[in-house]
Image (cartoon, rainbow, N blue to C red):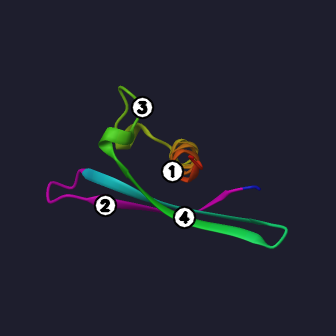
C-alpha cells in the first residue's frame, strides 16, 4: 500500500519556537484504507536535528517510520 502525506501542521510555543509537528498520512489499496495523524515531538527527531532543520520529505519519512512501528502486530 502506498502511504502519502496529506497534512503537515506546525505548533508553536509562546516564544515562536516550534514545539511539535502534526503529520497526516493516508493510503488505500484493494478496498482497505488507512488514515493516521501523528504528532512528532523533539524527542522523535534524529540526533542533532531540530524542527527547523527538517524538510517536508524528512517529516514524511519520519512519520511513515513511526506509523510502521505503531501498527506492527505483536503476539
Residue 75 vs residue 68, the one in the foreground = 75
In the shown orientation, is residue 34 left or right of residue 67?
A: right
Residue 69 location (% of width, % of height): 53, 45
Q: Are marks 2 and 1 in contact (CB under 8 Å)?
A: no
Magenta stretch: residue 55 in it? no
Q: Give the magenta range.
A: 3-17
Q: Mark 3 highlights which residue?
A: 46
Q: Mark 4 highlights which residue?
A: 36
Q: From this view, report whether residue 32 is shown above or below residue 40.
A: below
Magenta stretch: residue 15 in it? yes
Q: Are marks 1 and 4 in contact (CB under 8 Å)?
A: yes
In the shown orientation, is residue 39 left or right of residue 35?
A: left
Q: Mark 2 highlights which residue?
A: 11
Q: Mark 1 highlights which residue?
A: 70
Mark 2–mark 3 distance (CA, rounded to whole Å): 19 Å
Q: Main secondary structure of the magenta part?
A: strand
Mark 4–mark 2 distance (CA, rounded to whole Å): 18 Å
Tell us which disc is closer to us: 2 or 3.
3
User: Image quarter for residue 25?
Assistant: bottom right
Residue 48 location (% of width, % of height): 35, 26
Q: Earlier in the sequence, mark 3 or mark 4?
A: 4
Q: Residue at x 59, y 50 (%)?
A: 73
Q: Earlier in the sequence, mark 2 or mark 3?
A: 2
Tell us which disc is closer to us: 2 or 1.
1
The N terminus is located in which quarter?
bottom right
Rendered image: mark on residue 61: none
Q: Earlier in the sequence, mark 4 or mark 2?
A: 2
Q: Mark 1 Cα within 10 Å, few/some/many (few <14, many 20+)?
A: few
Amino acid at each position: 500500500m502506498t502511504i502519502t502525506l496529506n497534512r503537515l501542521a506546525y505548533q508553536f510555543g509562546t516564544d515562536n519556537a516550534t514545539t511539535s509537528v502534526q503529520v497526516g498520512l493516508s493510503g488505500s489499496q484493494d478496498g482497505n484504507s488507512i488514515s493516521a495523524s501523528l504528532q512528532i515531538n523533539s524527542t522523535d527527531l534524529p540526533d542533532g536535528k531540530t524542527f527547523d532543520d527538517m524538510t517536508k520529505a524528512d517529516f514524511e519519512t519520519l512519520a511513515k517510520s513511526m506509523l510502521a512501528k505503531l501498527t506492527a502486530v505483536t503476539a
